[in-house]
Structure formats: C-alpha cells, structure tokens
Image (cartoon, grey):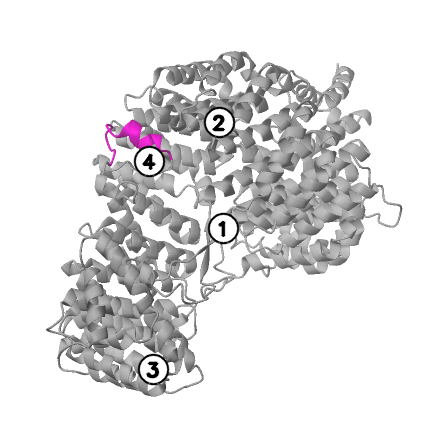
Amino acid sequence: MALSADATQMAALLAALTHPDTNAIREAEVTLKPLLKDARCVPAMVEVVKAQGTQNDAVRHVTAIILRKRIGGHFPKFDAATKSALKSELLNILTTENSRPVRNGVVALVAAICKVEAEDDQDSAAVGGGWPELFQFIATAAADSHPEARELAFLLLGEMTDTIGVHLKPQFGTLASLFGTALQDGDAKVQNASVKALGLLMSYIADEDEIDTFAPLLPPVLTVAEACRVRGDEEIVSTTLDVLYDLSFSASPSIGAHMASIVKFSQMCMADSNLEMGVRDSAALVVATTAESKPKHLGRDAPLLTGIIETIFNLIETSDGSAAGALFESNPAWKEDFEDQEGFDADDENAGGPTQTSMAQGTLDMLACEIPKKYIFEPVVSRCVARLGSADPNQRKAGIACLGVIAEGCAEPLREHLADVMPHVFRAAQDGEARVRECACFALGQISEHCQPEVLSYSSMILPIVFQLLDDSNIAVQATSCYVLEMFCERLEPDGVRPLLDPLVKKLAAMLEATTKRSVQEMAVAALAATAVAAEEEFAPYVQGVASLMSKLMVLKEEKMFSLRGRALECMGHIAIAVGKEHFRPYFHSTMQCACEGLTFDSTDLHEFAYAAFANLAKVMEDEFAPVLGELVPHLITVIGQDEGQFEQAEDEDKAGQFNALDDSDDEDEGGNYVMHIRTAILETKKGAITAIGEMAAHTGAAFVPYLEESMTVLINTADNWHPLVKAECAEAMPSMVVSIVAKDHGGEITWEKGDVSGTSSLSTATATVANAVLTALVTLMKDDDKTVVGKACEGIQSVIELCGPHALSTVANDCLENTFNLLSKQAPCQLTEYGEEFGEEDDDDHDSFMTSVCDLIGSLARVMGQHFVQYLDKFLPAICFYAKSSRPPSDRSMAIGCIGELAQELGEGIAPHWESVFFPASIAGLGDSDCSVKRNAAFCIGVSCEGLKERITSQYSVLLTALSPLFSMDASQSDTTAACIDNAGAAVARMIITSPANVPMAQVLPVLLKSLPLKNDMTENETVYNCLMGLLQMQQPDLLANKQELARVFTEAVSEESKVDDDLKEKLKLALQSLS
C-alpha cells in the first residue's frame, strides 16, 4: 500500500537519519524539527512504521524512536476516537511485525502512551486504566503458543515498569501469576524477558510493602539466572545481580527469607572466572550489602558464612595480583612504579576497575566490619592460621593478607588474641616469598593501625623486623614496610623507638634519596613523619637533616609530584608537633610559605595538605601563628562555606543517546528532573579547612576573637551539611570557638563550682553567648543519624561544659540529658535499625566505639552537675549496667564499669542508695572479669566508692580486699593493660587506707602494696598512692615502719631521673626518703 504524501515526506527525511553523512543528518533534523511540532506527524510516522516490506527496517526503527520521543506532547491533544484508533493500530503492528528492532521500538512507544494514559486516568482502578485493551493484549500474548509472542508480553511489561509500579498496584497478583508462568517457560528468550521485566519491577518497588507479592518468585528467578551463568549469558546474570542488590536493603521478611539463596548465587558468580570482572564485582557487592543490611541473619547461618569466607580465600590464592595492593589503589604512582614488579596485575582490559583480589578483600573487609564478631572472627582467623602453615606460597599469601584485611572490622577480638596471632605475622614477614612478605607488611600495618595500644607491647619485635624489610630486594616490600612504620610509630612512646631511632632515620633518609619510585618516596616521608611523632623531642637532632630533604620536595611544581610535595609538607607539620616550638621555629616560615604557595595551585590535594599543615603549626606555634590569621581565616571561611555540590538537569532516558535534537524539549515548559552532582574533592578540602580553623581558634588565644563571629556562623551552618564527615569535623571544631573567647575574657581558665547554678555566673556575656550557641548546635547533632557525628558531638559537649561549668550547661541540660539517655538505651536516630533486622539483646554483641564518648559525657555531666545528677541515677544506671553484662564484649564491659566508676567519683555519697544494688555487685563482678581493662576500671570504682561513701561501707572492706587481691599477682610485664590493672588495684587500696585505716589489715596489705610499686602505667594515681604512704609514714604507722626497707626502695625509684612522677611530688618524696635514712 502506497504511503500518503505526508508519510512519504516523513520517510524520506527519516531515512536521512540512517545515513553515515553527518551533514545530511543535520539538514534532515533541521527540516524535521518544525514538522514534528505538527500533530499530523503522528499518523504519518505510524504509516512509515507499519510499512513492513516497503520501507527499510532501519528507517522504520528510527521512526519508532522519534515517534516515542514526540508522542508525549501530541497524544493528550487528540480526541478520543483518534487516540483509540492509534492505540489499536500499534497493537496490530506488534502482532504482525517481524523485525525485532522495529518491534522493540514500538514496544517502547506503546509503553510511552500507556504512561500518558495512566497519568491522565489516575483514579481508575480498572485493569490498564485508559487502555484496557493493552493489558488484554499482554495477557493473550503471554499465553500464546509462539515464544516470540510470549516474549513480547514481557518486553512490554518491562518497558512499562514505572507505570505499573505507580498506577497498577491492584493488579500485582495477576502480574505475579504471569511472571511465575513465564519463569518456568521452556524457551530461554521468554524466561530472560520475564527476568528482566520482573527485575525492573522488583527494583522499582523494593522499599514498598507490595514487594511481598513478588518475593515468592525469587527462587525461579535465581534458577533462570543460574542457568544463564552456566551457559555464559552474562546479561541476565548482571541484570539479576542488580535486582538482588536493590533487594538486599529491603526490610521485607519475605525477601529476607531468601537471603541464603541470594548469597549462594552471588558467591558462585564471584568465583566464576568465566564471567567478566565487572559482573563478579556486582555479585560481591550483593554479598557485602547483605552483610551490611542483615549482619546477624548472615552471621547466624554458619555454613553460608563459612562458604563465602572460603570462596574469598580461594580467590586471593588464585589471583596473581598483589594482596597488599589495597594500600596503593588510591595512589596514581603505584601503577607507574610497580608495573614491572612481581605480583603486579597489569590487566589492561580492566585498568582502573576491580580485580579478583580487590573484590575478594573488599568483600571480606565488609563482612569483618558488619557481621557480629562472634560469628566472623574465628572462621577467618582459623583459615588464616591454617594457610600460613601451608607449603604453597599462594596459600600463605592469602592467609596473611586476610588477617590484615579483618584488622579494622575485628580489631577488638584481634587485640585480645594478639599473643596467638603475632608469631604467625612475624614468621610471614620473614618468608622466602616476596609476595608473602609484602602481605605480612600489609597485615602488620593494619594491626598497628587498628590494634592500639596492645600492639605497642610488641615494639621490640616489630621494629627490628621492619628495619630488616626496609632493605628487602623487592621494592613493594620496602614500600609496605614504610607503611608499617607509619602506622606503628604514630602511637609509640619515645622509649619504644629510641633503640632504633638513629639507624631508622638514616635508613629512611637514604631510601628517600636513593629511590626514584614516587610511591616509595611518599611512604618513606610518611614513615619519617611518624618516627618523629614517636620520638618527640628526641627527634630534635635530626630536624635539620630531614628538613633539608623535605625542602627539596616542598618546591616540586610538576602536577604528578604534588602528592609527594604534600607529603613533605605534612612531614614538616608532624616534626613541628614532635619537637615543639623552640626547635621548629627556624623552619616555621619556610613551611608556611610552602603551604600558602600550595593554595595557588589548582590541586585539591595540595590544598588539603596545606590545611593540615596550618592546623599542626597553629597547635605548635600558638601565639606566634597569630600574625597570619588575617590572611588565612577569611580564606578558610570561604572554603568551608562553598557549595560542594550543584544541581544539574538529569538525563532523561528518552533524551539520551541519538536524535536528541528531535525530542520535544523545546515544545514543553517543563522544569525537568535535577540531580545533585557532588564534587568529593571539595568535601575533603572543606573538612581540612574546618580542622585548620578549629586548631587556630584553640591555640592562638585572644588573637582569634576578631574572627570568631564569622567563623561560628559558617561552622554552625555547615554542621547541617549532608555529609557525615563534614558534620563530624564541625562538631570537633566548634568547641575551639569557646576556647578562644575564654582566652580573651577569662585568661584561658574559668573557675566554677560543681553543681552551683544558683550564684552569679562567672561567664562573661560574650562567653555565655558563644558557649550557648556551640552547645545548642552540638546537642542538636546528638540526634544525627550518623554515629561518628554523634560521638564527636558528645565529646564536644564534654569539653565545653568542663571548661565553662554548670551555668553553660544549664541552658541545654534537659535536652542534653534526654539525648544522652536515648543514646544509652539505643533509642537515638543513629541506632534505629533499618533493613528489617532487630537488635536482639543477646545477639547485639559488638562494641560501638561512639558509645564510649556517650559514657564519657555521662561522667562529665555528673562532674559538672554534681548532686543535681543524683536524681537521674534511677533512670541511667540500668541502661549503663546493660553494657556490663557478661554477654557483652570486653570493650562494652570496660566502658560500663568505667562509667559507674566516674559516677562514684563525682557523686560521692550520692550513690549510697545504689551501692548494694549496682556499684558493689558490678565492681566485684568486674574484678573477676577475664579482661584486664574491666578489672582495672572495677578496681578504680571500688577505690573511689570507698572514698566517697566513707564509713558507710567499711564493713565490706574485707570482701573488697579479697576481691582485689588476685590483681596483685598479675605479671606487670605482660602488657600495659596488665600493668595498669595492678596500678589501679594499688590506688584502690590506698584510697581505702586513707578513708578508714582502722578497717584495713595493714600487716597483710602493706607488703603486697609496696611490692607492686612504683606505678608502672597509670601515672594519674601517683598522687593518691604516694600521699597515702607519706601520710602513714608521718603517723609512724608500725606496719609501714616494719617495711621501711621496701618503702625506701619504692621512694628511691619514684624520685629517679627515669621516673614519670611529677616534679612537685618528687620533692615531697625526697623529703620523706630522707626521714627513712
């Protein structure tokens, strides 16, 4: 049948769009544009589409695409008869069309019209709303004997996903039946089309209750997807994994019931080396998000969890890539420096994408961080140990690498088992295979970073091994050994680094000068910085030489060297922290000059390094930093206040791809959809600027006050930022604003009385105003949904109220107490679970580190409120004691006992009504705990309780001393926590003696106490212990005099040059020592 004149013209112009000639296409588009604004173009294009046999399929396909783009503007303007005729015509075309591309184009066109009809007829509950014939067509096609027809039904449903998801919920039961039948279809094309369509719909309604209707279809979907995986049909496998990812966050129990099947399928995809790496990584993402959303359900299924873990180990074993590469993935110099090294995975086809090793390690990291430790720790560590004993170097590599990967997520149980784990790590560090040694360095670095302070007791073993590895023949091992030094030395005391300080500095300096590898240079610089921090003032002799090396790096101007330049600047800031103002003063100007120059480059990395340098130098130079405030603070305020995101118009699917010039965007006055594009680099610089301005306020004193108002305004506004890291940084910086005004108006210190709000406030008007504004903002942040932000807010409140006292707290006390209790009882926004998992008391067994800040705040509230806090004990104590239960992890138990110890110390006699029911049983249980930190805090609690309750509890001294006695038999050399435990036991006994010497059996107690002295770890208790002994000496207590020789030994050691007893107390002890001679 011949085309009409309009259709003929349209066909000719549309045909030009299929030609490779760009100019011809543009000319055709210019001619078509006005024609497409006329509604008569619609029937003309329909004519072209249905001209099967007379018009080229490519032309008809293009016509269907253009018609879909334009139909939304024309269809609503047609009368009912025209609409009905057009819809009928399109269904006829679908019935007879032989060309797959054309049919797919018409499917999309039909879906577009259906969407328009549904939106115009939103109140209709009838099947299909304004187009019931379409749904009858789909139902008929789905039951057709020809597989092409059945496939067509699900192609239509797939295209209509958003329309179905919004407008046709009453028909979900019927649709589920259609999908269920199609998933069992004998034709693969029908199955695949149904999986795609169902997947789109399930993803669309994943967060809605209606997902339950389709949840029973997951098993057949997985069956189809598994068949596709076996035969290598990656498209369906990838589609299925995308759906499973969306469903992994669903709170529906119906979806959760299929968790094991979902994870097993994903696990098989991860392990399938025949799949593209991107598909396998999608499978890993499903496993990781399941661990995040349903950690307990996954953890309780031991066979499922161990299967995943075994797969992860196997993946790392069979990968050629470096299992320590996670350290360097963000470092652009790594590939350049190490592509010729053993173990470097130079997969050009996957450059910049996931590798088998990174996929496996990333998944294990998420499992370790999210799943309760009692489920994940043992199966991972047992496999690590088993593989480390293997003769196969790839197994040893996997074993030590996985140990490093779990160090962050499983830090608490790993700290408890360091004695069992570290020998394996040390052996791996001296393995004959470079790939094993490299991974051992990675593991050592991770353990050094996350298992502080317990790992510091291994310094005498770690440092010599690392020193040896710095000379390793493998460059990658050298680089990772620098990383170990950086992580390990950050918390090390001068005593720990002193034996190797000189050769270590010389070795790192020589490495820095000798190597041409940028990444090794960067890590050597970072290791030097950490060594300086550990050595403190003992690093002073090396400052000149190291500063000379850094000065060469701090003037690098080549863009690819910016990271090294920044590291050198960072190193100078750390050296300043280490050696102090006097030693660093000669290098202050040049370091500041480098930092400021870095701001002139278009490099967010250099800006970050500059802000970190400003923060450190302000901290060290204090008032000498003040002259640059006028230049820097306005700049920092601008950076903090800038918008790190911008709204841009979202790309419409209809407008994406080809023929964009022919859509109807110029005909419609639509606002369009906009999305926020985040410039993450600006987020990082903003965070650095916040840190810098906080340190400037904290350390430049009154000189900062002229910038206070503007700084506070930008910080309080930014505290409402969408990103939790920015909010957390604001929470940390805001208390510094109070410090500056206190420096100006109060000379840096405010004298206040515990609990006294009745008298005149000692706060100046300005201080009260600043403190109130900061506290109000921080109390608001306590209700944030991010735990890190909440923890920082609690720490900020604590610092402000302890500086300013009860008058400052009174303005926010009620809200602060309410928020604190909600956090303690797990009812705060950041603790409300999502994804359908509930917090079971017996199973919610992981320590939330931010809760330590909450409990510290409780102690601070008692310190400031005094007896006013007693009225809240009935409410707070049961919630605190929940964390002291034996089923809780050691960190929780330690935290809880520490908290009640602080309450006992601050409230004194106020705890009397709760001694028998809470403080006494909790302390006794704590002394019998297996964890040294719990024992230590229990001993402290007993001591301060005796001190505060005085004669009320002297009748229980015998029980208390008996419970304390085993602590004195512990080996102080075993670890710092053991030493601290003994110290706190000694302090508890000293407090009991001071309070009621008559109720302490001195003849039995004093020899034990003296034998444990001097204190080894907790120097804060020196005054308590030595004042007790000097008081007894002054009283000429007979039992003490009977141990005069031992007492003289204690005092002699306490006044020695190496002793950490403060100078004033040393002078008193020297006088006491003279009286003994």
Q: Earlier in the sequence, mark 1 or mark 2?
A: 2
Q: Quadrant of the N terminus?
A: bottom left
Q: Earlier in the sequence, mark 1 or mark 3?
A: 3
The amino acid type of the residue labelled 1 equals Gln
Q: Outermost residue, right direction?
A: 759
Judging by the rendered image, the residue that carries numbered circle 1 is 646
Judging by the rendered image, the residue that carries numbered circle 2 is 489
Quadrant assignment, res 699:
top right
Q: Earlier in the sequence, mark 3 or mark 2?
A: 3
Magenta residues, as a range?
Answer: 331-345
What secondary structure is found at the residue carrying circle 1?
Answer: strand
Measured from the top left, where is residue 966 in percent x and y? 58, 39
In this picture, residue 74 sits left or right of residue 932: left
Judging by the rendered image, the residue that carries numbered circle 4 is 324
Nearer to us: label 1 or label 4: 1
Judging by the rendered image, the residue that carries numbered circle 3 is 173
The amino acid type of the residue labelled 4 equals Ala
Residue 928 appears in the rendering: no
Quadrant assignment, res 467:
top left
The amino acid type of the residue labelled 2 equals Cys
Mark 1 and mark 2: span between their CA atoms?
41 Å
Q: Quadrant of the C terminus?
A: top right
Residue 317 appears in the rendering: yes
Q: Earlier in the sequence, mark 1 or mark 4?
A: 4
Quadrant assignment, res 58:
bottom left
